[in-house]
Amino acid sequence: MSRQQDDGFVAVYMAVLLTGLLLFTGLAVDSGRAYVVKAQLTKAVDGAALGAARNLNEGDPRGEATRIFKANFPAGYLGTSSVTDPTTDPNFFSLTTDATTGVNTVTVTATAVLPTTFMRLGNIDTVTVGSIGEATRNCCEFRLCCTEPCVPKIIGRGTGPR
């Protein structure tokens, strides 16, 4: 092989090597950003679920979940282009009650779309991350019973929040 052919081979070899290196760097950078967004999204939905469970007996649990979510995951966080809108998305908040045990379960679900930076070279333009937070709370039932004449005794079921 001549010297000129070696130079051409090295140029092709370096182009392939650098493209692969950029793709793996992009994978590291973009997956790191997606991990940070996922962690913050998880904190936001967990806090929203706990706040809503705390307000089950008083106030507006969905409104409290919305307020806490928006405070912990603001619009455009780390460049997210699309986030679940808690005021309009019907799947953001759900409340179920088990009739036999009296346990209330609050579930908060959210997703966010993060545009990539380096991974666009590999034709991956966005990464979607999602999280689900769930909190349970026992329903408290108290009634007044008289065991002795005029000696009231409170009988309760449940221990409050758990």
Image (spheres, helix red, strand yellow):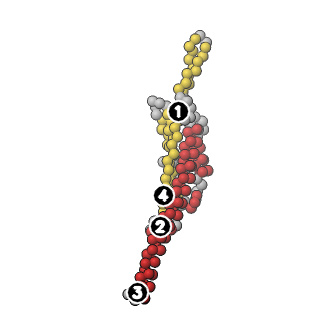
Q: Position of residue 116 (x, y in %)?
A: 51, 64
Q: Quadrant of the N terminus?
A: bottom left
> In the image, which disc is placed on residue 5?
3
Q: Earlier in the sequence, mark 3 or mark 2?
A: 3
Residue 49 against residue 124 in the figure, above or below: above
- Whether tag 1 and tag 2 are in contact, CB under 8 A, the answer is no
Task: Give the SS element for disc 2.
Answer: helix
Task: Give the SS element for disc 1.
Answer: strand
- Which label lies toward us, 4 or 3? 3
Q: Position of residue 3 (x, y in %)?
A: 42, 88
Q: Amino acid at mark 1?
A: Asn
Q: Which residue is mark 1?
A: 138
- Whether tag 1 and tag 4 are in contact, CB under 8 A, the answer is no
Q: Amino acid at mark 3?
A: Gln
Q: Earlier in the sequence, mark 1 or mark 2?
A: 2
Q: Which of the two residues, 70 or 131, is positioned nearer the viewer here? A: 131
Q: Which residue is mark 2?
A: 24
Q: Earlier in the sequence, mark 1 or mark 4?
A: 4
Number of residues whose C-alpha sits closer than 10 Å to that of mark 4, classed few (under 14), some (14–19) or many (20 or more): some
Task: Give the SS element for disc 4.
Answer: strand
